[in-house]
Amino acid sequence: MSERKKGSSLLQLPTDYTVIDLEATGLDPQYDHIIEVAAVKVRDGEEVSHYNSLIQPPVQDDDGQAYYVDDFITQLTGITNDMLASAPTFKKIKNDLWQFLDGELLVGHNVNFDINFLYDNFAQYGLTFQNDFVDTMRLSRRALPDLPHHRLKDLCAYFHIDGEFHRAAGDAALTDNVLHHLAEYIKANHVPLTRHRPSVDLRQLQADGAGNPDHPLYGQHCVFTGKLSRFERKQAAQMVVNVGGFCDNNVVKTTNFLVVGSFDYVSNVKGNKSTKIKKAEKLILAGQDLHIISENTFYDMMDAE
């Protein structure tokens, strides 16, 4: 797949925008499919129109049994195969949805997930999708850096917002509510959106405990690159140190693992390869015992006994 030429991620508090949210069969646009989309158009802080539709994905097959979504997705979202059987395909709704979103500043929570799915689906039909966007997750990390997690449900709990999760229209409404609360908090506390947090020397972190000699990262040197989705880098590094590993700021000849996050908001990284990745690749080719792993693989290792 060619590199996506998406719009820009903006750190601002808009009053005119469109909130978007999707439900999908999984996390990867290359293999998974949209099953629901919601978009709420807002002007001067008030809803003026909305778009909402289930979307029928390609039929799956398991031992001769045809289905659209598995039991996990149904339990998570409440969307059933019967509901999708009568839903339109993306091809049928693409023009209406594209026209609704055309020219809009988009708002969403962890919105790059939604942007990637929409970008790839529109691209199949020759439709350009380069809207700029505001991510409420990114805003919340600036406004509330000490919050342990910045998922939508975490922010709703923090701001005492009630609602139903994992349906597109409900999540879009919750995201809009979170944006309003974040805007009030940021203004009231004079949070500078252009603020850059000082870098942390990960080598200076001290373990909270004796470590775990049986852990796969015990005694191993880890380095992080890109933006982590679940934790701040310092928090993830502390997890490594607590099990008896070491964290460095840069890839060196003692590095055993390079953990790769997202580069979606990193303007100086092109082609999804940071300087650390390129250096790691050279060291691997030179024979170093170094592994480049995804953020999710890192969490799997952290959960290992």
Image (tube, rainbow, N blue to C red):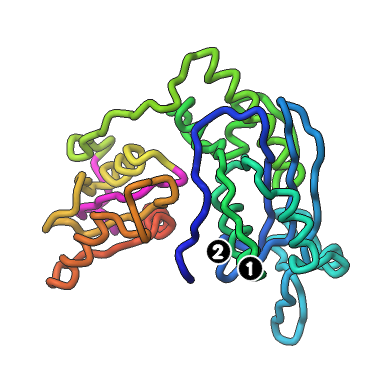
Farthest residue to the top: give it. 188
Residue name at image x 47 percent, y 15 percent: 190
Tell me where residue 26 sits by quadrant.
bottom right
Q: Amino acid at mark 1?
A: Gly
Q: Position of residue 80 (x, y in %)?
A: 80, 62
Q: Is residue 228 left or right of residue 22?
A: left
Q: How many marks?
A: 2
Q: Position of residue 240 (x, y in %)?
A: 29, 46
Residues shaded magenta:
210-230
As for residue 185 lying within the magenta part, the answer is no
Residue name at image x 56 percent, y 57 percent: 116
Q: Position of residue 275 (x, y in %)?
A: 24, 55
Residue located beneath label 1 in the image: 126
Tell me where residue 34 sits by quadrant.
bottom right
Residue name at image x 71 percent, y 41 percent: 172
Q: Position of residue 36 (x, y in %)?
A: 74, 56
Closer to us: mark 2 or mark 1? 1
SS majority, magenta: loop
